[in-house]
Amino acid sequence: MANEEQLAILSRGVEAWNEWRLENPATSIDLRRANLRNKKLENANLAHADLTEAELSFAQLKNANLVFAKLDHAMISFANLEGANLGAASVENVHLEDSYLNNTILTGASFKNASLSNSSLKNSSIVISSSISITIQPSII
């Protein structure tokens, strides 16, 4: 389960969250199974965060830093991730249907069994290896 103290800080807004992250750079971020549905997380520093099984549907993650984040089994449908950085993130078994991923950095991310159906990926930076299985249809690329 998610760390309640960290959820409380995040609930105060992105500015408070990012300031706390700057003050606590070595703290592990545990947001497993957190309900962040409809949350405004634009520009949030979620790098290295454990968001396993988190509910992020309809979340506003525009320009969020999700580098090395663990998003396995998360629900991220109808989310806005425009300009977000998911470099080297683990995005396995994730539902990213109908999401907006334009101008997103996905390089080095693991998308095994991820579903991106009906998601927009215009101008995104994607490097896909042959061992990755992604469902992207019918998507706008």
Image: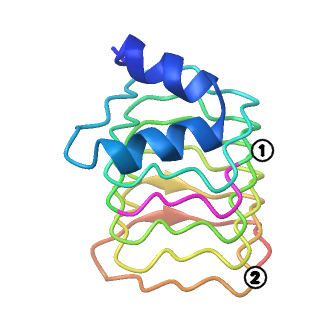
In reply to whether residue 32 is colored magenta, the answer given is: no
Majority secondary structure in the magenta region: loop
Task: State whether residue 57 is above or below residue 34.
Answer: below
Q: Residue at x 55, y 86 (%)?
A: 125
Q: Is residue 85 left or right of residue 20?
A: right
Residue in the picture at 52% in, 69% down: 85
> What is the x, y in percent for residue 94?
49, 45
Q: Residue at point 36% right, 61% down?
A: 89
Q: Is residue 93 above or below residue 53?
A: below
Residue topped by disc 2? 122
Q: Dot 2, how many residues are within 10 Å of its Cα: few (below 14), some (14-19), or many (20+)? A: some
Q: Is residue 62 shown in magenta?
A: yes
Q: Position of residue 20 (x, y in %)?
A: 43, 38
Q: What's the mark number on residue 78?
A: 1
Disc 1 residue type (three-letter): Phe
Which x, y percent locates residue 140? 80, 74
Q: Which residues are magenta?
A: 61-67
Callout count: 2
The kind of residue tagged 2 is: Lys
Q: Which mark is residue 117?
A: none
Q: Nearer the viewer, residue 5 or 104?
A: 5
Location of residue 140 with respect to 135 vertically, above or below? below
Q: In terms of depth relative to the viewer, which is nearer, 45 or 62?
A: 45
Q: Tell me if residue 71 can be seen.
A: no
